[in-house]
Image (cartoon, rainbow, N blue to C red):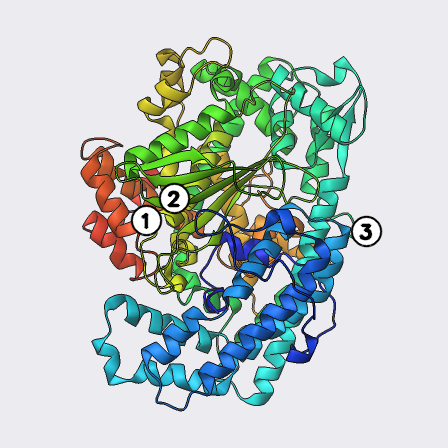
């Protein structure tokens, strides 16, 4: 039951889980649908560490019957709770709901992992059928009148005051989520709401699979040394490896994913090829063919607007932000526009520097978007004597895995030990047991899936396979981090960029949020917090990459083993705010458009025209394109996950910048007392208290935006 009730709060697992393909078909799940034969996906997880997902038993054909059986079981559990004759209490209603749905949790966990990392045509056939069924199943629960009356009774009961703070928070969460999901609507409105949710499930998965298709099937092939001009050896090796994957012998391939495209745009001397690769990447989902997403975007926006009005909200943005820290879209827009203006001013300065360099070299060009990364890197070299290729040899993927584990040990007393007795979905995935360094107590498992492959969505993210909780005994968590690094030559260490290393620390911050969880009820566990708060722990962890202890221990040269020279570290530190104009505008423009789209209400949106006019309205610099153009904006259109919520990264970074100040004002980034406050008030408490209160308990005050402006170099 808990995945349903926290679906507006949980983060990247639900994002992956709702990346389904769908059709218009819908059947009500009943006992008559149950398959006769046992299904290994339905059983309790067996093996060590309190049980592990049975990835070695997965067959795509098992998913449909497993989902249908698990949904039927869960509905039976719900009906039993709704029909209890005794008066509603916290135990017989709220706790009973927390204990329901475990079979469905297990099945959807594996199903979601397959959808985001192991997808293929056979799996997508299952998705087409199951997406609307899953949407209808959710509504069968939130629209169960007898069940809602029991929840409402507990919520309004004077006895609620006798509950502890965590229990009261849980009651509030159930009541609020049911109301926000339409529990108080009349019969006709509920029926229409169900139709909308089914249609959205279909459109979300159509959108995401269109993007996945173009990322898997579009690439640029290089066939001569001349086409490789400017590319460092590590990039050439990755492109050579991609050529093997794409069956292009003797060639080099730039894949249609960020991890392949951005290094090429940064280093290639061939301007014509930079433009070709750039256009391939930014046109995903926007090529006017069967995989074009523009019409789908319009349909999604119309349905979201209708749903918001049905639920009593002015717009989808107002519905989404009601329980976020920002509370209203107006507050979120106020923050974004306050940062937007200085960021754009910085971009103009950056472009001026790049144009001056191009003119000095008589390049005879005007800086265009496919030139930005290339000239940015050359300006960095000129201004700071810093070449990212000097840094990369010190950033080995395996050593950075050691680094994030070491930081977790210093801050949270965790120890990571390879677990080779755990089945995995793909041979590239590795698993570690996490325990307490002092007591040896088992904390959880951490899975790491680092490499790009066909059927795996692009980007980097965290999943929770199992939430920490106590109502069913001491249940430990299982979390994963996922990335899309392109493999280099076999047997050689994979070298990654500083930005990729930062992303590793970021995503590991989400994992640590789950691993530190210390709550009773699974719906409040780990990362199940407000959308604009969930990025705070992850963005905070980025700060530890640049700490001297990490750099000296783990940033060692892949050939000599010597630590990164202090002179090079000094260059990195001096250039910390370099290119912050580009980084901020690229992200923030997408966040602003996300909010504007969802504040437009039921206005009919043409995605191409809206993108163009909205960017012109806010003064988008010509030389930069959105980090996620609308036809490929998976955060916003492959689920409701980050819709009207992409601003969350900026909101959280205000908190992040302020929070790291607690360490710098004390004994430094590894100060034990501050780390203990961080664990106690932020990382371990999940959603047991209001996040604003939680932050005040840690910092002693509310966060201040000045820290963010200073961090990005925008302060005076």
Give me the residue at 32% from left, 22% from top: 548
Dot 2: what SS? Answer: helix
Checking the image for residue 289, the label placed there is 3
Q: In the displayed image of the protein, which residue is found farthest to the top?
A: 560
- Viewer-proximal residue, 119 or 495? 119
Residue 593 visible in this rendered orientation of the protein: yes
Asked if the residue under mark 1 is in contact with the one under mark 2, i.e. CB atoms within 8 Å, the reply is yes
Checking the image for residue 512, the label placed there is 2
Q: For the residues marked 3 and 1, what is the alpha-carbon distance in whole angstroms? A: 45 Å
**Percent of width and height locating residue 214:** 74, 44
Instruction: Give the image quarter of residue 130.
Output: bottom right
Q: For the residues marked 2 and 1, what is the alpha-carbon distance in whole angstroms? A: 7 Å
Q: Earlier in the sequence, mark 3 or mark 1?
A: 3
- Vertical placement of residue 68 versus 252, above or below: below
- Viewer-proximal residue, 582 or 391? 391
**Percent of width and height locating residue 507:** 46, 41
Instruction: Give the image quarter of residue 231.
Output: top right
Asked if the residue under mark 2 is in contact with the one under mark 3, i.e. CB atoms within 8 Å, the reply is no
Give me the residue at 47% from left, 35% from top: 504
């Amino acid at each position: 039951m808990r995945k349903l009730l926290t679906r507006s709060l949980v983060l990247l697992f639900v994002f992956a889980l709702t990346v389904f393909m769908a059709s218009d078909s819908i059947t009500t799940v009943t006992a008559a649908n149950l398959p006769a034969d046992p299904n290994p996906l339905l059983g309790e997880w067996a093996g060590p560490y309190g049980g592990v997902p049975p990835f070695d038993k997965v067959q795509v054909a098992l998913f449909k019957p497993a989902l249908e059986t698990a949904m039927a079981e869960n509905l039976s559990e719900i009906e039993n709770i709704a029909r209890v004759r005794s008066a509603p209490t916290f135990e017989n209603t709220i706790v009973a709901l927390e204990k329901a749905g475990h079979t469905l949790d297990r099945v959807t966990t594996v199903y979601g992992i397959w959808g985001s990392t192991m997808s293929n045509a056979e799996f997508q056939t299952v998705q087409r059928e199951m997406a609307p069924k899953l949407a209808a199943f959710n509504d069968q629960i939130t629209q169960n009148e007898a069940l809602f009356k029991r929840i409402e009774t507990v919520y309004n009961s004077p006895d609620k005051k006798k509950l502890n703070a965590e229990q009261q928070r849980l009651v509030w969460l159930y009541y609020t989520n049911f109301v926000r999901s339409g529990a108080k609507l009349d019969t006709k409105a509920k029926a229409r709401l169900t139709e909308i949710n089914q249609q959205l499930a279909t459109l979300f998965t159509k959108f995401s699979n269109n993007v996945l298709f173009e990322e898997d099937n579009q690439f640029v092939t290089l066939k001569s040394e001349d086409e490789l001009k400017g590319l460092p050896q590590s990039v050439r090796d990755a492109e050579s490896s991609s050529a093997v994957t794409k069956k292009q012998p003797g060639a080099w391939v730039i894949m249609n994913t960020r991890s392949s495209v951005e290094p090429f745009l940064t280093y290639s001397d061939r301007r014509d090829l930079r433009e070709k690769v750039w256009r391939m990447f930014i046109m995903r989902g926007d090529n006017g063919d069967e995989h074009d997403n523009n019409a789908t975007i319009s349909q999604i926006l119309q349905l979201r607007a209708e749903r918001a009005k049905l639920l009593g909200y002015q717009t989808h943005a107002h519905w989404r932000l009601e329980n976020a820290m920002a509370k209203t879209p107006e507050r979120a827009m106020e923050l974004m526009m306050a940062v937007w203006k200085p960021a754009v001013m910085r971009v103009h300065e950056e472009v001026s520097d790049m144009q001056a360099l191009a003119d000095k070299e008589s390049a005879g060009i005007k800086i265009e978007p496919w030139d930005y990364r290339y000239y940015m890197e050359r300006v960095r070299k000129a201004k700071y004597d810093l070449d990212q290729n000097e840094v990369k040899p010190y950033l080995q993927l395996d050593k950075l895995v050691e680094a994030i584990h070491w930081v977790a040990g210093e801050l949270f007393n965790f120890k990571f030990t390879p677990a080779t007795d755990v089945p995995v979905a793909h041979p590239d995935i590795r698993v570690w047991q996490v325990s307490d360094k002092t007591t040896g107590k088992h904390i959880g498992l951490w899975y790491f899936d680092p490499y790009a492959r066909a059927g795996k969505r692009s980007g980097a993210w965290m999943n929770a396979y199992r939430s920490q909780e106590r109502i069913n005994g001491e249940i430990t968590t299982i979390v994963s981090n996922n990335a899309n690094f392109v493999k280099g030559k076999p047997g050689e260490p994979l070298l990654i960029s500083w930005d990729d290393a930062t992303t590793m620390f970021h995503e590991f911050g989400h994992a640590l949020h789950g691993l530190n969880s210390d709550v009773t009820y699974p719906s409040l566990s780990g990362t199940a917090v407000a959308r604009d708060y969930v990025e705070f722990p992850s963005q905070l962890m980025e700060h530890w990459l640049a700490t001297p202890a990490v750099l000296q221990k783990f940033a060692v040269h892949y050939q000599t083993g010597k630590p990164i020279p202090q002179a090079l570290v000094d260059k990195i530190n001096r250039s910390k705010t370099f290119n912050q104009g580009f980084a901020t505008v690229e992200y923030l423009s997408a966040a602003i458009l996300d909010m504007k789209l969802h504040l437009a209400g039921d206005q009919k949106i043409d995605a191409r025209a809206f993108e163009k006019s909205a960017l012109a309205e806010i003064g988008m610099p010509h030389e930069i394109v959105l980090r996620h153009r609308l036809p490929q904006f998976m955060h916003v259109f492959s689920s409701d996950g980050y819709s009207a919520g992409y601003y969350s990264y900026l909101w959280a970074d205000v908190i992040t910048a302020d929070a790291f100040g607690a360490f710098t004002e004390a004994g430094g980034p590894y100060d034990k007392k501050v780390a203990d406050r961080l664990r106690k008030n932020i990382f371990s408490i999940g959603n047991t208290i209001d996040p604003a209160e939680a932050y005040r308990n840690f910092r002693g005050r509310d966060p201040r935006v000045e820290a963010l402006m200073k961090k990005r170099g925008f302060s005076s």
